[in-house]
Image (cartoon, helix red, strand yellow):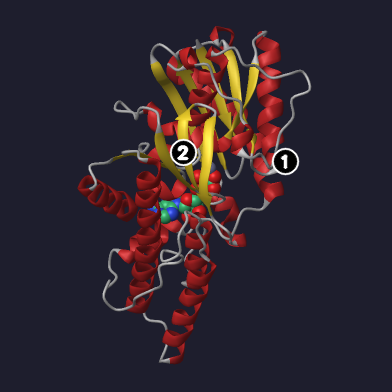
């Protein structure tokens, strides 16, 4: 089965072709970062308009890359939520239009399920059950995954998402949006001993997160440096390092706690923040000591992309799921509402 996947939930247009027998055939991505950078965040209307411009050319590019013609496609999967309503509607309308024209089914996919299953695109992929840490610009969630659509929420952020915290800290340091990769770059030259930022909520039981206190601590530290003679380049690197260390340590502690609580030895991390090399290295080091293993997507599939939507859509389409006639986008869509999938549907 050959599936075209479209991702347009936020500020990246992603398109991919996934074949359930041959794997990923082609993918293309356009990031709108340059459009939004001067506003310091994503402007929804600009995002929608750019998806209108980019999605079809990317579809053509992907078909050409794979040497596939439109009518060869068996189904079209698209991100139906959660995300920005206008941006989602562009992808949904295009996907359903293409599917209608080709006389094939369309299926709306949950964006976070896409992230969650992205490690399955790798050669070595995890077996169910596992614990997943989903860390993106909009979500920080620990989920027990017993199969596709069998999700139990173990913990989530009570305020900012981890990626959002990275973006806000970056803004305080005068770094552009999205801030995560910029903080990570500065942190490489930072002194880990200079500041000791708080590790939010690690001393409280449970698996929820909160990053607002850390955000305030970061702002106060920036202001202290300014008051003490100006924010130097070294100050910025040291603050970036301390901030990154605090977020990483918090995420690692909660992941180990979740694995212990669930009696599992497999962790999956996905979403934009899972591209962070410090987080990957710390998790690998700590989990090895526990006899556990961590799986993550290739860096290009950590942030938003069409491949994860094509893959997640493929699993559900194989199990016979298709859009109802009145299907609509869902800007807010709790992942626990997704239906489970028959085991034979998993490729
Ligand atoms: O999953 P994603 O591409 O979009 C959402 O669905 O939100 O995640 C984007 C988030 C941004 O907040 C960005 O700053 C963060 O992921 N991010 C990182 C890194 N790369 C992207 N955060 C920390 N370190 C990175 N290397
Ligand atoms: Zn995402």
Name the element at disc 1: helix
Among numbered discs 2 and 1, the one appearing first in the sequence:
1
In this rendered view, identify the residue nearer to me: 317 or 183: 317
Locate residue 129 relative to residue 90 in the image: left or right.
left
Name the quadrant of the C terminus.
Answer: top left
Seen in the picture, residue 103 relative to 182 is either above or below; the reply is above
Q: Can residue 223 be seen at all in this image of the molecule?
A: yes
> Which residue is denoted by mark 1 in the rendering?
86
Residue at image coords 72%, 27%: 93
Residue at image coords 31%, 49%: 280
Number of numbered discs visible in the structure rendering: 2
Locate residue 16 relative to residue 51 in the image: left or right.
left
> Which residue is denoted by mark 2 in the rendering?
144
Q: Where is residue 209 in the image (x, y as percent from the top left)?
A: 50, 58
Could you classify mark 2 by the number of other residues whose Cα lies within 10 Å: few (under 14), some (14-19), or many (20 or more)? many
Q: Where is residue 240 in the image (x, y as percent from the top left)?
A: 38, 68
In this rendered view, identify the residue nearer to me: 124 or 9: 124
Q: Where is residue 142 in the image (x, y as percent from the top left)?
A: 47, 46
Residue at image coords 45%, 17%: 346
Name the element at disc 2: strand
């Amino acid at each position: 089965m050959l599936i075209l996947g479209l991702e347009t939930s936020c500020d990246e247009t992603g398109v991919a072709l996934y074949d359930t027998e041959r794997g990923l055939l082609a993918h293309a991505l356009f990031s709108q970062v340059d459009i939004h950078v001067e506003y310091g965040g994503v402007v929804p209307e600009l995002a929608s308009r750019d998806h209108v411009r980019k999605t079809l050319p990317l579809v053509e590019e992907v078909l050409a890359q794979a040497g596939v013609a439109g009518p060869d496609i068996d189904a079209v999967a698209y991100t139906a939520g959660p995300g920005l309503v206008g941006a989602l509607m562009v992808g949904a309308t295009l996907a359903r239009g293409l599917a209608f024209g080709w006389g094939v089914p369309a299926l709306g996919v949950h964006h976070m399920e896409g992230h969650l299953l992205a490690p399955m695109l790798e050669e070595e992929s995890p077996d169910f059950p596992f614990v997943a840490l989903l860390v993106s610009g909009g979500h920080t969630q620990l989920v027990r995954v017993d199969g596709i659509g069998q999700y139990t929420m173990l913990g989530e952020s009570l305020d900012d998402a981890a990626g959002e915290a990275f973006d806000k800290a970056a803004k305080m340091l005068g770094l552009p949006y999205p801030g995560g990769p910029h903080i990570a770059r500065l942190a490489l030259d930072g002194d880990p001993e200079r500041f000791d930022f708080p590790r939010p909520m690690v001393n409280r039981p449970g698996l929820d997160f909160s990053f607002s206190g850390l955000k305030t601590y970061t702002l106060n530290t920036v202001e202290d440096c300014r008051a003490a003679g100006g924010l130097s380049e070294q100050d910025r690197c040291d603050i970036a390092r301390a901030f990154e260390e605090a977020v990483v340590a918090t995420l690692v502690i909660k992941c180990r706690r979740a694995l212990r609580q669930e009696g599992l030895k497999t962790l999956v991390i996905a979403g934009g923040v899972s591209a962070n090399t410090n987080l990957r290295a710390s998790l690998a080091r700590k989990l090895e000591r526990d006899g556990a293993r961590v799986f993550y997507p290739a860096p290009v599939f950590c942030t938003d992309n069409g491949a994860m939507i094509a893959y997640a859509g493929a699993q559900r389409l194989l199990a016979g799921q298709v859009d109802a006639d009145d299907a609509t986008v869902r800007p807010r869509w709790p992942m626990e509402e997704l239906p489970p999938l028959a085991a034979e549907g998993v490729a």
